[in-house]
Image (cartoon, grey):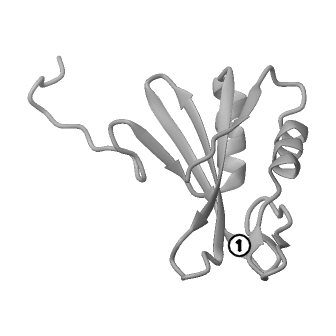
Amino acid sequence: MPKDPTATTQKEPNQSDGQVRLRKWEEFKQQVIEKKPGSIVFILEQNGFTQDKEITILRLIMMYDKKYYIFIDTPKGDTLRETAISLHKDKKGTRFLDEDEVKKYLKNQFEGEKLEIYSFWTT
């Protein structure tokens, strides 16, 4: 029986028309390995919920088939919750991620994949 062209399809959880949000680091890694994109982008964010921008997060983005696959890692103690990348403190005690450490970590995680890794800065 042919499909009804007026029928609506239900979207997967955490998915909109242009983006797929992945909640676990292992899910993001698996998507990168399966889809084999040419590159991924990481963003080190000082998410200004507090006056001193205490909350530091890592956002990873992969573009594939006209969709953005997005993973966000947040702090838990002195490391990020999913990737366990170390957080550092500046002289004022504000936590931050080191760009070179993040890039090295990602290169190690995707060793063997033909994948460029880029940092994207926002202000």
**Image quadrant where residue 111 sits:** top right
Query: Residue 5: x and y, percent?
Result: 12, 23
Query: Residue 117: x and y, percent?
Result: 75, 32
* Residue drawn 86% across the image and 37% down it: 107
Q: How many numbered discs, if any? A: 1
Task: Look at label 1 and name its amino acid.
Answer: Pro
* Residue drawn 65% across the image and 23% down it: 37
Name the residue nearer the viewer: 11 or 28.
Answer: 28
Q: Is residue 8 left or right of residue 20?
A: left
**Image quadrant where residue 73 sits:** bottom right
Q: Is residue 69 left or right of residue 11?
A: right
* Residue drawn 48% across the image and 22% down it: 65
Return the residue at label 1: 75
Name the residue nearer the viewer: 105 or 11.
Answer: 105
Name the residue nearer the viewer: 93 or 21.
Answer: 93
Secondary structure under the numbered disc 1 in the rendered image:
strand
Q: Is residue 52 above or below residue 115?
A: below
